[in-house]
Amino acid sequence: MKYFAVLLPMLNEEKSQLYRPQHLEFLEKMSNEGKIFARGRFADGAGGLVIYIAQSLEEAKSYVEADPYIVHGARGMEIHEWEMISAAVKS
């Protein structure tokens, strides 16, 4: 499996607020299916980031294109394959 970082920059704040419940429901479903590694919004309101787990870029793109934020034009999307490197926690 591969990781794909998806930036979701704000395009339309009104639509973003309107479709937020559907977006969060979608993300919860995808998380429950094991297709999301991490997700969250940017504190400055510029959008958010979702890290999907998929076999290929095409598969990850199909996930993103099903997100209500993308379907309804509330957010843009930028997808990058992400090579995760875990940092050891030092005490």
Image: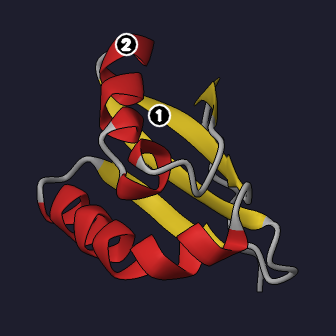
Q: What residue type is disc 1 on? A: Tyr
Please state if 21 lies on the left or on the right of 49 as rendered: left
Image mark for residue 3: 1
Out of 40 and 87, give the one closest to the viewer.
40
Q: Residue 78 in the image: x percent, y percent?
A: 67, 33
Q: Residue 24 in the image: x percent, y percent?
A: 35, 75
Please state if 54 lies on the left or on the right of 73 as rendered: left
Out of 28 and 75, give the one closest to the viewer.
75
Quadrant occupied by the N terminus: top left
Which color scheme is applied?
secondary structure
Compared with residue 8, is residue 91 higher up or lower down, i.e. above or below? below
Image mark for residue 58: 2
Secondary element under disc 2, as helix, strand or loop, is helix
| Separation (CA) of disc 2 from disc 1 | 12 Å
Please state if 10 lies on the left or on the right of 44 as rendered: left
Compared with residue 55, is residue 11 higher up or lower down, i.e. above or below? below
Tag 2 and tag 1, C-beta contact below 8 Å: no
Task: Decide if residue 58 is in sight here.
Answer: yes
Q: What residue type is disc 2 on? A: Glu
Q: Residue at x 44, y 15 (%)?
A: 57
Q: Residue at x 80, y 78 (%)?
A: 45
Q: Residue at x 58, y 57 (%)?
A: 74
**Splitting the image into 4 quarters, where does residue 91 fall?**
bottom right
Residue farthest along the left direction in this orientation: 33
Please state if 28 lies on the left or on the right of 78 as rendered: left
